[in-house]
Amino acid sequence: MIDNRPIDFGQFWYSLGKELSEIPVAAETEILQMRSTDFADLYGVHMSSIGPYKIYGYLSVPKGDGPFPVIYYVPKNASVLEIIPQGTSNQIRSRYITFSVACRGMRTSDSPYSAMYPGQLTDGIESMSTYVYRGIVADTLRGLDFLLTCPYINKSSIVAWGNDNALLAGALHGAVTHIVSTPSFLYDSIQQASQTSSYPLEEFNDYFRLNPEKRDEVSKILAYYDLKFHASAITAETLIMADHEGGLHDSKTLSEFKENMSGQVTLHTSERSSYRDGMFAEEWVTEKLFGHDVAPIVPNHWKSE
């Protein structure tokens, strides 16, 4: 791969990390009794990120003695914050600490910014300093900063799980030991957007229809977030959940990215089944963190499939 990343790529991310480090995490937690269970306690967490801006997350901690492995559900391009992803067994909270952080602009975060869906991917994209994803990546890293302050976590077992942000977390924060990611919008974004009319990538097409003269400038900004330029910095063991064969982000499209990653990588081609793909991911994580002899925790209806 020809390395045509921006000349100040490293400085950009160093400056973001430095700015974030100068803002105290300032975490405020409260027990949420209604969502706690007999096997896990749930907390609402407010933290400070760049802006300054308050972000919000759900922290679930198993009852009993730790330390516990962590599944960190990174901020995602969506308007709903879940304790755990829809379709995941609630019992997973008995085995793992789970931490899900709201994407900047969601209603549980600060009120001054309210994201539009669609519309978030191009919010503030007119300049490097105003592009919302600068803040979202900072929020993703801040969630890891918070987790490292928790005395009951197993620091050798921290899984970043989600979309492109999970891979950026692995590239930019040393705490991540494992990654489960479904790349969706930050890999060669403009080229991928030209091949689809589906959201969220269609947001870029919408933007260029209205602002065709800004294509070059937007392309330059997105290069700082392009996963292909972060690949070599990812050392965590990684599961990439690719599209089905022929899909936009299929194994063929992502093969070069995979080869340039520094850590061990498993590339799973979607079987077009939420059950089969979900089972593969749960089995992969369980094996990596607990070994072959431990069964994954999955929804009851999966067990009868």
Image (tube, rainbow, N blue to C red):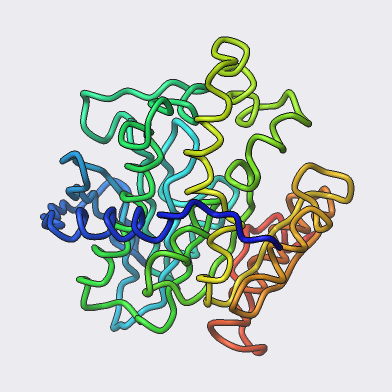
Name the residue located 54 percent from the left edge and 13 percent from the top edge: 211
Horizontal and vertical percent position of residue 277: 74, 57
Question: Is the N terminus in the top left, top right, bottom left or bottom right quadrant?
Answer: bottom right
Looking at the image, residue 2 sits to the left or right of residue 104; the answer is right
Q: Residue furthest right?
A: 246
Q: Taking 264 as reference, is 269 above or below it?
A: above
Horizontal and vertical percent position of residue 288: 59, 82
Q: Residue furthest front?
A: 7
Horizontal and vertical percent position of residue 194: 74, 29
Name the residue located 74 percent from the left edge and 55 percent from the top edge: 242
Give the mark count. Answer: 0
Name the residue located 32 percent from the left edge and 50 percent from the top edge: 138
Of 120 and 190, the residue lying toward us:
190
Q: Taking 108 as reference, is 116 above or below it?
A: above
Quadrant in which residue 258 is drawn = bottom right
Looking at the image, residue 159 sits to the left or right of residue 105; the answer is right
Of 76 and 227, the residue lying toward us:
227
Looking at the image, residue 70 sits to the left or right of residue 196; the answer is left
Name the residue located 40 percent from the left edge and 54 percent from the top edge: 8
Quadrant in which residue 89 is drawn = bottom right
Of 186 and 13, the residue lying toward us:
13
Q: Taking 129 as reference, is 238 above or below it?
A: below
Horizontal and vertical percent position of residue 245: 88, 51
Q: Residue furthest top?
A: 210
Looking at the image, residue 71 sits to the left or right of residue 215; the answer is left
Question: Is the C terminus in the top left, top right, bottom left or bottom right quadrant?
Answer: bottom right
